[in-house]
Amino acid sequence: MKSILILFLFSLSLNSFAQDVEFKSGNFKEDKDGFKVAKEELELGTEQWELGNLEVFAVRSPQNYYLKALEHFEKAYLFNEKSAELNFKIGVCHMHSTDKYKAIPFINDAYKRNPEVDPFINYYMGRVKQLEGEFEKASKFYETFETEYKKADDFIKFVRQRNSECKSALALQDSPIRAWIDHVPELSSEYDDYAPSITMDGEEIIFTSNRPNAHTPNEVGVYDDDLYSATMVDGKWQSPKALKGSINTPSNEVSNNLSYDGTKLLMSKINDAGNSDIYESFLKGDTWSDPIGFSRDINHKSNERFAAYSHNGRSIYFAKDKPGGNNGYDIMVSGVKVERERSWGLPVQEQDISSKFNDGPIYLHPDGKTVYFASEGFNSMGGYDIFYATKIRGGGWSKPVNMGAPINTPYDDFFFAATANGKFAYIASNRAGGKGGHDIYKITFWGDEKMPSLQTEDYLLASVAQPIQDPELVGEVKVTSTAELTVFKGKTLDALTKKAVEAIIEITDNASGKIVESFTTNSATGKFLLSLESGANYGIAVKADGYLFHSENFDIPAGSAYNLVNKTIELKNIKIGSKIALRNVFFDTGKSDIRQESNAELDRLAKLLKDVPGLKIELSGHTDNTGSAQNNIKLSQDRADAVVNYLVSKGISKSRLTAKGYGSDRPIDSNDTAQGRQNNRRTEFEITGN
């Protein structure tokens, strides 16, 4: 009898612990005034909560309504925390915020107190179990909800997608990829920090945050989204700072994609009609220009956002409202028609990487072969997941592949941005464990059974931060594809003062003589960053007013793996005695016939002589010490003569030109190595009069 009584009391204790204390006056006879105030707060919160629910069903943004509701619910909760209804409503508010994990204890508590507290309790219990990683339990709740809901509408399709996500998650979590995911506290705050976009070398990042700023917060105390940047020094991110210029306004600005060289930025913001449009801003020195909108070919009457540059800048990918509106986003692509006029063609849907649900943000890897994008469709684990697809020969993309755990979770994981070597990437996620809201996370891909080393090359972009010494370069790590490109970065300086020089850099395919890229280095720092695809011999000419032009040559065989070259280019003033090597003048071995791929370099020299009519130069030929000194003198003289003859054929007076062969008498490097001998085999010119 005694044991039965103990069991009864224990059972009563459990029921009491999980009992549902409703907001009824009879439950609070001893505090009628407190009940009246709390009841009023519950009713005021419910009004906002119901408005938020209507927005959810209209597939719009309900956050502000739920935030207003929370303000009232939290006051009521201080009076009565045992109400299943109140716990449920608080949980729903959190579930529609960027802090979804906060919903878990409230929804669980509501279900324990009253499993029938609301017709949608089984759906939200499914969401809770999905967020907790209990995917089989989540599926059962979703299936129960579907049975009881008994409607064939868009919401039930959404519930079925949630159920499908649980089945996908069970498969994906069994085979996690080889990667570390680390929270980046230097870039994150208790507010929403998201949309990271980085330069190819991974040393400069731009992201979006609604942390407190100089603008006025809205009616629920939330600040607008502004754009921030940070620089990596010695492997650590420095404190973020708001972008300079008038790019940040009291409206929301969302960073979409930073061009690989860090000089252009795609972003989205709300237009006067209340829709999201895509804009572009340009870096000049350390200041970003006012955002410029795209034409109606891209920015139509619908919402456009999440834009990204293609690897060569000839196309723009972005997300656009699905036909009919309020049905999510499709991924579109638009090709450039006239680049200087910022004229773009009509967008076409990328059907291979568009799902039936929301798609985007998008990121195109510099290798030109891989696209990364976020989607709530396909085989997502829950919320937004990050997928990748590869280019198919003949056009189109391969079937999207979920990047899997630990990159993806049942929370929202999106805004993928990678370094050119494929070793590091940054994403935004609102998973549990951050500082709050969306935070920035760093992915380090392990590669094939070897520990990764940190990459800390010199950083890019117009920043007033002090430059750092260049440490060793980091090699490529194969993730989903091999990055067959060379990243060429550096800065242009005055050779004497060491101050930054704003210079024009032209990249020429020496085989065709075609200029494949032309850009200007940063006026504040002289810095530049670009990628060169494998399979070509490139001539790189650096020009600035009042300076001799500088040339580099890169021969990148087809199939070459990722490489990074960091170079400081010191430009010399146009004055008597200044010398410059013509690195893109080529001769066959042992001969003095100028090869065709030398034409672009020599044409630039001819233009310089025409632009500065009083300039006189000596063309000098140099060899290594291989062979006899007499033969080297003759060969170098013949080559110098050949260059003079070419310039004369381009209209340059021979009286301004002198040819001199020095053989191996003036080495600039050791003749004991192959590289040294190659450096010694060169054609130079020296200014002898101006």
Image (cartoon, rainbow, N blue to C red):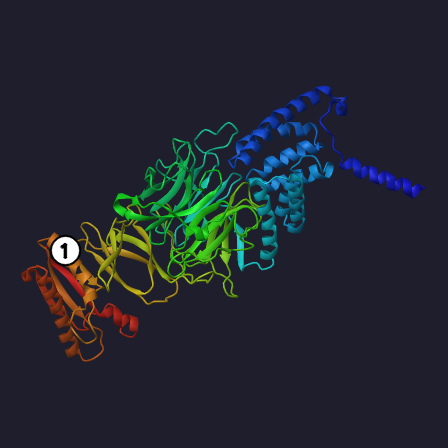
Looking at the image, residue 157 sits to the left or right of residue 36; the answer is: left
In the rendered image, is residue 99 in sight? no
Percent x, y for residue 159? 59, 44
| Residue at the outermost top position | 33
Percent x, y for residue 42? 64, 26
Look at the image and tell me in which quarter the N terminus lies. top right
Residue in the picture at 66% in, 21% down: 37
Residue in the picture at 51% in, 41% down: 189
Percent x, y for residue 253? 41, 37
Percent x, y for residue 61? 51, 35
Figure quadrant of residue 74? top right
Q: Nearer the viewer, residue 539 or 528?
A: 539
Looking at the image, residue 112 sits to the left or right of residue 190; the answer is: right
Q: Is residue 284 above or below residue 650?
A: above
Figure quadrant of residue 651? bottom left
In the rendered image, is residue 44 in sight? yes
Residue at disc 1, secondary structure: helix
Q: Determine which residue is flagged by label 1.
A: 607
Looking at the image, residue 422 sits to the left or right of residue 589; the answer is: right
| Residue at the outermost bottom position | 628
Q: Residues within 10 Å of mark 1 (few under 14, many from 20)?
A: some
